[in-house]
Image (tube, rainbow, N blue to C red):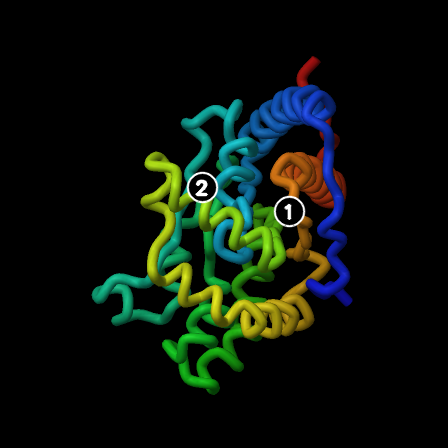
Amino acid sequence: MKNIEHIDLSKKIDKKTYKKELKDLQYELLSMQQFLFNNKVGLIIAFEGMDAAGKGGAIKRLTQRLDPRGLIVHPISAPQAHEKRYHYLQRFWRKLPQHGQIGIFDRSWYGRVLVERIEGFATENEWQRAYDEINSFEKTLTDENYIILKFWIHIDKDEQLIRFHERLNDPYKKWKLTEEDWRNREKFDDYIIAANETFQKTDNAHSPWILVPGNNKNYARIKVLKETISWVKQEVNRRGFTYQPID
């Protein structure tokens, strides 16, 4: 069973190896993007994790060499007033990529069983039944022409504090740090409990969770690229396609 306590946060990669692997993996993913487009298979990737875990940096490296015409990144924040008039999944249905395109969610529908659960924005009945709703949502998509992969990037409390102070002292990153981030930090352990229950109830063969050690940013970025490429290859082959990268 996947569990945050089992993540080895000591994993790291040296800068030279990182740069070489990053370039090679990014070009391989670009080739894969064209394969998905030609075969009309959609790819959906959801990112979750602690504040300052490096989700944005991982997404940047994941998308850096991709064709922007076939890609969209959705930064998910609290629902707007008009979105609260609908079922919480409605706003995610509207953001799904077309077949053959890639959709990336920086935060996702899992907010229902994470932040909304912890902050009391959803009742216990609402977030408890959300596990089945989310499983059904993802199964509906993967039964059709979609591939789904979900990343949890994790850092420990000490590393998070270091990154908070780095943001505080960097005028180009200061905007990323809010009072809400400091408040969420006080509930760090609550998020671990909620996340572990989420993995237990929504880690499925068709839409797995990948837990990524994030204390070393470079390691996390390479891990995300490798896991994405590996999972897409596995899924397209399972669906009867013959994946062949561009020479």
- State which quarter of the image contains the N terminus: bottom right
Query: Residue 87, relative to residue 70: is it above or below?
Result: below
From the image, tell me which residue sits under label 1: 215
**From this viewpoint, is residue 85 visible?**
yes
Cα distance between the residues tagged 2 and 1: 34 Å
Q: Name the residue: 75% across, 47% down.
A: 10
Q: Name the residue: 52% across, 54% down.
A: 161
From the image, tell me which residue sits under label 2: 98
Front residue of 194/218: it is 218
At mark 1, the secondary structure is: loop
Q: Name the residue: 37% across, 47% down.
A: 176
Image location of residue 106, percent across then percent down: 46, 49
Query: Of the residues shown, which amino acid type is indicated by label 1?
Result: Asn
Identity of the residue furthest to the bottom in this view? 125
Q: In the visual, does 117 lie left or right of 238?
A: left
- State which quarter of the image contains the C terminus: top right
Image location of residue 8, percent across then percent down: 76, 53
Nearer the camera: disc 2 or disc 1: 1
**From this viewpoint, is residue 236 visible?**
no
Q: Name the residue: 48% across, 78% down.
A: 127
At mark 2, the secondary structure is: loop
Query: Residue 181, relative to residue 10: is it above or below?
Result: below
Front residue of 206/126: it is 126
Query: Of the residues shown, which amino acid type is indicated by label 2?
Result: Gln
Mark with earlier residue (2, 1): 2
Identity of the residue furthest to the left in this view? 82
- Crowd around label 2: few <14 · some 14–19 · many ≥20 (10 Å): some
